[in-house]
Amino acid sequence: MWHPTPARRHPLPTAHWPTAEAAAAGRWFRPIRIAGTTVLQRTWVPAMVPWRATEDGLVTDDVVAWYRRFAAGRPGVIVVEATGIRDVPSGPLLRAGHDRFIPGLQRLVEAVREASHGETRLFLQLIDFLAVKRRPQKAKYFERFLALSERHRAALVAATGDGRWRDAPEADVRARLAAADDALLDRVLDWREQEALRFGYRERVTDLHLPHVRELPAVLPGLFAAAAARARTAGFDGVELHYAHAYTMASFLSRLNTRDDGYGGKREQRVKVPLLVLRAVRRAVGGEYPVGVRFLGDEVIDGGNRIEDATWFALEFARAGFDFLSISKGGRFEDAKQPAVGAAVYPYTGPSGYECMPTVISDEKGPFGRNVALAAGIRRAVRELGYDTPVVTAGGICTFEQAEQILARGDADIVAAARQSLADPDWFRKVRLGLGAQVRRCEFTNYCEGLDQMHKQVTCKLWDRAELGEPGLAKSADGRRLLAPSWSPPETPSRPSLPSSAPG
């Protein structure tokens, strides 16, 4: 993974864990209303893809076990992993693109209800993505994938001074290009062809020559709406529309969206499709059903959106009726590391990916709460215009004190933690019970992110590998890692009562 330079290793923030009484009186454990739903705590587990679904996108026993284990920690909200809105092959990712997925999703909802004793609200994150192909072998690219044209022949003649390439057999031209060095290929191939060769072919929302891309503004609202309706039928408490990172909806919002059909260019045009999707989803699920959005406070790429763009979009989203705004950062394809041959480009390997998931190896700013300022700026602007839409922040949150300070300053309304929740799914409950000293703390080395990059079942290095030989413990496909923590959730001596209402 990319790291800033110069960099140093940062220690974990000191944690002074509260007593049960102090935790119960804290802001983090107070309820909040999201549309027609009361969330009992402002603790939040963001969407994480664990690679446990079937290749057909169906819920498995391992998927149920994953979410059941997080639910045992009784957070206010769990957002279920990015779930595809199309009924198309997409590997072991959950899908909601057809009614046949509803029974499995219902099973997942019921498991979370049971494990959390009804305390945790469950939202389904809905996502669309365009095609991304694996980086090809050089010979295969020129043999099978390059659409050879007169332009390539002319460029090869100009670059080599050899006129025979103008009329040479196609097979000979392809063989010459396959043997060419990078300097020659840079003169013969256009930038999209160079990208397809060196990173793998990737579709963009600006590819209007492709009919299915040109038709996205007409197609996406119905797909998202139908998936949201299935989520409601399955019993989810709400949905989160994925408008962040490297995927379709974020690409519509990006400054890099130069579509000339009325859906690109100026902000007012780039926001059209995201708002059309929201309106369609709202019609499908009703006004009281929570519909939130995850989007970027900063794309962290050349020519991309910055906080002023994100703030503008946030105001449009609040005005249009989104029920919460969840702020992320970076995670784009444009600056990703070149993948190995046979692998797909991964949007969290460059500077923008680092900003999305910073590690303890960081610049002077450090990784903890690094992105809170984005949420704070957005929340401030939203409040100044009179909207009370809850804002969710995340990124390097790993102590009760961090969360309390964020809420006390008014930087956010809800504080989320992904990697710390993965390290110890019980940590919210332990803090609530005054058992903070028992929390197993994330080391922020991004061991989990490395597994995700390889599309392996995501686990945490803190999950006691020493017990791999013990019978009855679920193990990864390669048998080398545990699929869940080996310890049990803490017993509840007497459950603290919840405050009767949210603060004003």
Image: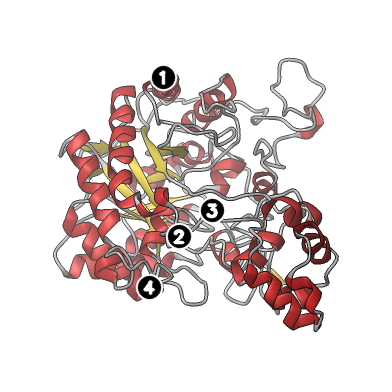
Say whether marks 2 and 1 touch (CB < 8 Å). Answer: no
Q: Nearer the viewer, mark 3 or mark 1?
A: 1
Q: Is residue 323 left or right of residue 211?
A: left
Query: Badge 3: how crowded within 10 Å, few (<14), some, or many (20+)?
Result: many
Q: Is residue 455 above or below residue 176?
A: above
- According to the image, label 3 marks what residue? 398
Q: Residues within 10 Å of mark 1 (few under 14, many from 20)?
A: few
* Mark with earlier residue (2, 4): 2
Q: Are the residues tagged 3 and 2 within 8 Å (C-beta)?
A: no
Which quadrant of the figure has residue 142?
bottom right
Residue kind at label 3, given as amino acid type: Cys
In the drawing, does residue 179 fall left or right of residue 421? right
Alpha carbons under labels 2 and 4: distance apart: 26 Å
Distance, label 3 to label 2, CA atoms, is 41 Å
Marks 4 and 1 in Cβ contact (< 8 Å): no
Q: CA distance from mark 4 to mark 1?
A: 40 Å
Give whichever of discs 3 and 1 has the lower sequence position: 1
Residue 155 in view (yes/no): yes
Give the x, y percent position of residue 405: 40, 62
Dot placed on the residue nearer the N-terminal end, 3 or 4: 4
Q: Label 2 amino acid?
A: Asp
SS type, badge 1: helix
According to the image, label 4 marks what residue?
307
Q: Distance of mark 3 from mark 4, alpha carbons? A: 24 Å
Q: Secondary structure at mark 2?
A: loop
The span from disc 3 to disc 1 (Cα, nearest Å) is 38 Å
Q: Nearer the viewer, mark 2 or mark 4?
A: 2
* Residue labelled with disc 1: 100
- The foreground one among 251 and 47 is 251
Badge 2 is on which residue? 207
Sequence-wise, the earlier of marks 2 and 1 is 1
